[in-house]
Image (cartoon, grey):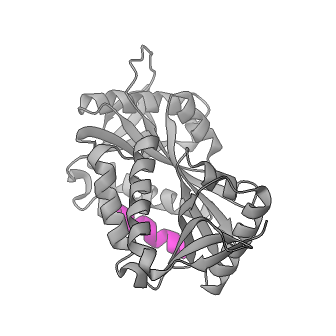
């Protein structure tokens, strides 16, 4: 049964926006990405930013999904940012067939190309069955994953790795390496060109660290074994539903020290430091191509709260 996309009538926009906002809130809370008031506050900020002119926002398209008899099957929200078309909301009354998903993706690809996009991105919560059914097997790959460990486990583990606060003398080299490493990861993820990645890495680092090593809520560590540095750790303190929450912003084992179990020990150290700083949860972001890190984190009890899937055109 073929599917088509038609613009959502202007008279239905406010109703759709209220429902889509609630879906975003519910999705965040169900996945654990954002909880309580955080989920509602994020939804308000998100819609204000992505739909600044409401139904007249030129970069956004809200479409009806209809069959060949023009019966509505659901709605779809697409937003263009730069050269990337984001699939931000898919709401269907019942599961679409494989053929309907094939046709729906084909129509999204046509729209993306017409709008000048070179990629399609689909941020999805783990429980979003319709979204995963749409992208699975249709050229999308996992670009990045948000994860959380909650509550912090009580582990009785011995450690060879000694973690200490990073010195002011060590910090400039860490800053350079972190910026370059993140830019390389952005390129490897397929999300940015080398030039875009360098600019984005620099932007994020400056945003996170306006006062460098002395930025409030940021803690930096070096890890050593028998006096030899083997890695670094950067934790940023956040709030999660009104409670202290730690976020792993950077973790790295030195290239010549890998495959010795130090990555796992650094993650154990992150748990200890997070608890010392008053947090009862830790979040992190990992690129989809880094399968070894994903396996490590999931083995430690982290769970996925959101994935960003990407398809090149």
Residue 110 horizontal side relative to residue 168, left or right:
right
User: Image check: 247 left or right of 253?
Assistant: left
Residue 247 rendering spot, x and y as whole percentages: 36, 43
Find residue 102 and report its image quarter. Answer: bottom right
Where does the image place residue 167, in percent across and percent down from the top left?
Answer: 28, 44
- Please say whether residue 131 is visible from this viewpoint: yes
- x, y percentage for residue 97? 75, 56
- Asked whether the viewer can see residue 169, the reply is no
Task: From this view, report whether residue 185 is shown above or below residue 302.
Answer: below
Q: Is residue 75 above or below residue 208?
A: below
Q: Nearer the viewer, residue 98 or 288?
A: 98
Magenta-drawn segment: 192-205
Measuring 42% from the left and 61% from the top, which residue is drawn there? 19
Dividing the image into 4 quarters, which one contains the N terminus? Answer: bottom right
Instruction: Residue at 38% x, 37% y: name it.
Output: 282
- The answer to whether residue 20 is magenta is no
Q: Main secondary structure of the magenta part?
A: helix
Residue ID at (19%, 50%): 216
User: Which of 237 and 313 lies nearest the eye of the viewer?
Assistant: 313
């Amino acid at each position: 049964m073929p599917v088509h996309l038609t613009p959502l009538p202007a008279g239905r926009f406010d109703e759709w926006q209220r429902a889509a906002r609630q879906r975003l809130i519910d999705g965040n809370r169900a996945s654990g990405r954002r909880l309580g008031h955080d989920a509602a506050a994020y939804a308000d900020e998100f819609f204000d930013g992505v739909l600044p002119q409401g139904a007249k926002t030129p970069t956004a398209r809200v479409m009806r999904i209809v069959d060949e008899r023009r019966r509505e099957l659901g709605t779809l929200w697409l937003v263009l940012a730069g050269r990337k078309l984001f699939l931000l909301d898919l709401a269907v009354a019942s599961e679409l067939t494989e053929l309907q998903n094939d046709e729906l993706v084909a129509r999204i690809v046509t729209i993306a190309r017409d709008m000048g996009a070179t990629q399609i991105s689909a941020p999805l919560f783990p429980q979003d069955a319709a979204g995963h059914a749409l992208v699975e097997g249709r050229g999308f790959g996992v670009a990045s994953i948000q994860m959380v460990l909650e509550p912090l486990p009580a582990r009785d583990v011995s450690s060879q790795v000694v973690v200490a606060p990073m010195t002011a003398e060590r910090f400039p080299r860490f800053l350079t390496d972190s910026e370059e490493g993140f830019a390389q990861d952005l390129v490897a993820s397929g999300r940015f060109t080398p030039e875009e990645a360098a600019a984005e890495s620099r932007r994020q680092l400056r945003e996170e660290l306006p006062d460098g090593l002395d930025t409030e809520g940021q803690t930096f560590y070096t890890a050593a074994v028998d006096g030899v540095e083997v890695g670094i750790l950067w934790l940023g303190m956040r709030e999660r539903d009104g409670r202290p929450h730690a976020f792993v912003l950077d973790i790295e084992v030195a290239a010549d020290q890998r495959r010795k179990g130090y990555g796992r020990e650094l993650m154990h150290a992150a748990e200890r430091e997070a608890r010392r700083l008053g947090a009862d949860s830790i979040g992190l972001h990992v690129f989809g191509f880094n399968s070894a890190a994903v396996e490590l984190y999931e083995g430690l009890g982290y769970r996925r709260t959101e994935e960003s899937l990407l398809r090149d055109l």
